[in-house]
Amino acid sequence: MAGGTWKATKQDYLEALQDQNPWAKLGAVPAALAKAVQRPLAVELWRTMIREPYRYQVVLGPRRVGKTVALYQSIQNLMTHGVPASRLWFLRLDHPLLMHYELGGWVKSLIRNFGVPNEPLFLFLDEVNYSKNWDKWLKTFFDEQWPVRVIATSSSTAALQNRTVESGIGRWSEQFLTPYTFSEFLSLRGEHPPTPPAQPDFLQTLFATIEARDQSSLRDKILDLFLLVGGFPELLDALKATNRNDMQEAMFRSQQVLRSEAVQRVAGMDIPQAFDIKNPLILERLLYVLAGQMCGLINISTLAADLELSRATIHQYINYLEQAYLIFVLPNYSKREDNVQKQGRKVYFVDGAVRNAALQRGVSPMDDPGESGYLLENAVASHLYSLALQSGGRLYHWRNRQEEVDFVYDEGGQPLAFEVAKRPGHHLRGLRALQARYPELHNRCFLVTSESVVFAAPTEDPDGVGRIPLAAFLLAVGVQTKVALTRRLGLT
């Protein structure tokens, strides 16, 4: 060191690589890195690296949702199926030593030092967007048939906005890792309630769920806990608390980490760097305002006035927050695309835990019926959003004057409608009005309730509206999301 400046040596780079790849010496991925419970993506992702023909995979999703863990689990799965540790290389590309050199240089060095003739290296590139020209290098690896196969991650599409779009066509596929579904949440707790067998489409899965009429998963306290802590692993440690005071303290600690990493870092660093935003505090303020309006219609004019920004800037910032997987907005359902874009949009969070962390709510929502109702609606929205990401479907709300329906999910021109409520006596005016406007939705509408164990198929009701309890519905969405994920990965 001279004059306060430190310069990395070759040995420093070698040690950084060794530290990131401990299985080369240990013969297995440490349990602290590859968690025992694997999410559906991790269960299947490694298979994409050994099939023919193959594509690279880029995994997108919010911060702190488990993308890096999925990479470690994929490495362990490959080792379990006979791939030597010497061919498995993990590179954390936001590492201070790795991020300053182009990806091609690192890969060329790995091939030169560890490559085996006629055998590819398996590369796991964490936070690939931190590597300069990453997309051009992936294109080069693929087109020039470098002996590598690749899975990469990034915390947002916003961070990838400078990539050359055509680079990925035919070369890699984008996969999505969203927060834990209710069924995954139960698995983490060691609970495995019966679920309907996978069906070809979502409607058939719902009918199978209703026909089974299983009530084993309808325990209010577990469902309430899921609505509070959501699907972020960061908050799951709070479940170990034995009383309310301990849970309150654990929840605040977890929410502080989630707020810092998944909210403030994204709004204050990731998005501003990707889009050159001069005042990131305004973006963060907008997120907090939207957190207070979760499940409501977005009023662009009011937001613009309150934040002293133009309407165009508000639209742009909301789009950035969507690309970072913090929120998503639902347009109004219509068969005509021009009408879809003209109507009001509703805002939801990718997980209620993000909203709770942003507002530092602790366990308070458990005591507020209104707030818990919003978390209930957001849970349904986030599950359907995850399904839509995997299936290529689209999710809407519907509103016509005084009548409204919470969600319309449309996959392949076969829409389904869902109204969410606490009690089974909730009115059906919105669903009836929707069916009157779109007769094809008859027998394709459902009332989803949290305080009922009533199961009924739409065909059993004169209004063409089925009934299904919330927990059973969330499990059904989880089943269908797994089916869609497998299809998206190109696996059978």
Image (tube, grey):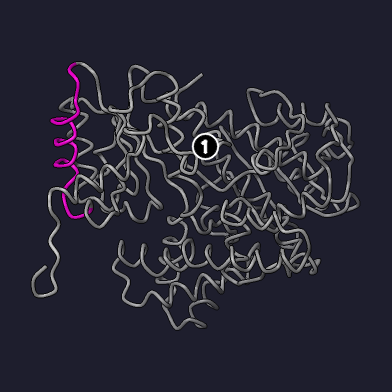
Q: In this rendering, would 321 be left or right of 171?
A: right
Q: In this rendering, would 258 be left or right of 22?
A: right
Q: In this rendering, would 90 be left or right of 382?
A: left
Q: How many marks?
A: 1
Residue 129 versus residue 34 in the image, above or below = below
Q: Position of residue 484 (x, y in %)?
A: 55, 31
Between 347 and 267, the one nearer to me in the picture: 267
Extreme residue in the front direction: 26
Between 272 and 265, the one nearer to me in the picture: 265
Can residue 164 be seen at all in this image of the molecule?
yes
Q: In this rendering, would 319 be left or right of 344?
A: left
- Under circle 1, the secondary element is helix
Between 185 and 376, the one nearer to me in the picture: 185
Q: Position of residue 424 (x, y in %)?
A: 89, 49
Question: Which residue appears at 48% of the width and 78% of the height?
Answer: 304
Residue, disc 1? 390
Can residue 172 be seen at all in this image of the molecule?
no
Q: Quadrant of residue 468?
A: top right
Q: Position of residue 393 (x, y in %)?
A: 55, 38
Question: Which residue appears at 45% of the width and 83% of the height?
Answer: 308
Q: Is residue 115 magenta?
A: yes
Q: Is residue 364 magenta?
A: no
Question: Which residue appears at 14% of the width and 42% of the height?
Answer: 105
Stretch of the chain drawn in magenta: 99-117
Question: Which residue appears at 63% of the width and 55% of the height?
Answer: 237
Q: Position of residue 71 (x, y in %)?
A: 41, 38
